[in-house]
Amino acid sequence: MSENNKPAAKVSIYPVHATIWRNGNFYSVTFERSYKDKDGSWKRTNSFSGHELLSLAKCADMAHTETLRLRALDTREANEEVAGDDE
């Protein structure tokens, strides 16, 4: 996988996982759920049952917080670059 395809961050509330992707100047988030199939093999899906919705909501809240943190870091780094150009 190329460097550009690496996630910016991941957060999880088992069995729900959020992957945060940098897309230019903004971030997008994908959600998955882990489960074991009848043979005991781990699988992932983007389908959620009713009893998993609270975990999905909490994971979305954590992903939102993480995207805000990442955007703040981007802003700080951009400001440092501008300040460095003035020297």
Image: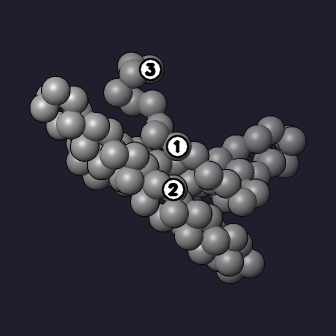
Crowdedness near tag 2: few (<14), some (14–19) or many (≥20) residues, C-alpha within 10 Å: some
Dot placed on the residue nearer the N-terminal end, 1 or 2: 1
The three-letter amino acid code for the residue at tag 3 is: Met
> Can you identify the residue that label 1 sits on?
9
Q: Which mark is residue 81?
A: none
Seen in the picture, residue 87 relative to 70 is either above or below; the reply is above
Cα distance in 3D space between marks 3 and 1: 16 Å
Q: Are marks 1 and 2 in contact (CB under 8 Å)?
A: yes
Q: Quadrant of residue 74?
A: top left
Crowdedness near tag 1: few (<14), some (14–19) or many (≥20) residues, C-alpha within 10 Å: some
> Can you identify the residue that label 3 sits on?
1
Q: Quadrant of residue 84?
A: top left
Dot placed on the residue nearer the N-terminal end, 3 or 1: 3
Residue at 80% over, 38% down:
41
Residue at 76% over, 57% down:
14
The three-letter amino acid code for the residue at tag 2 is: Glu
13 or 74: nearer the viewer = 74
Q: Secondary structure at mark 1?
A: strand
In the rendered image, the quadrant that contains the N terminus is top left
> Can you identify the residue that label 2 sits on?
66
Work out which residue is located at the far left of the displayed protein and give it. Answer: 86
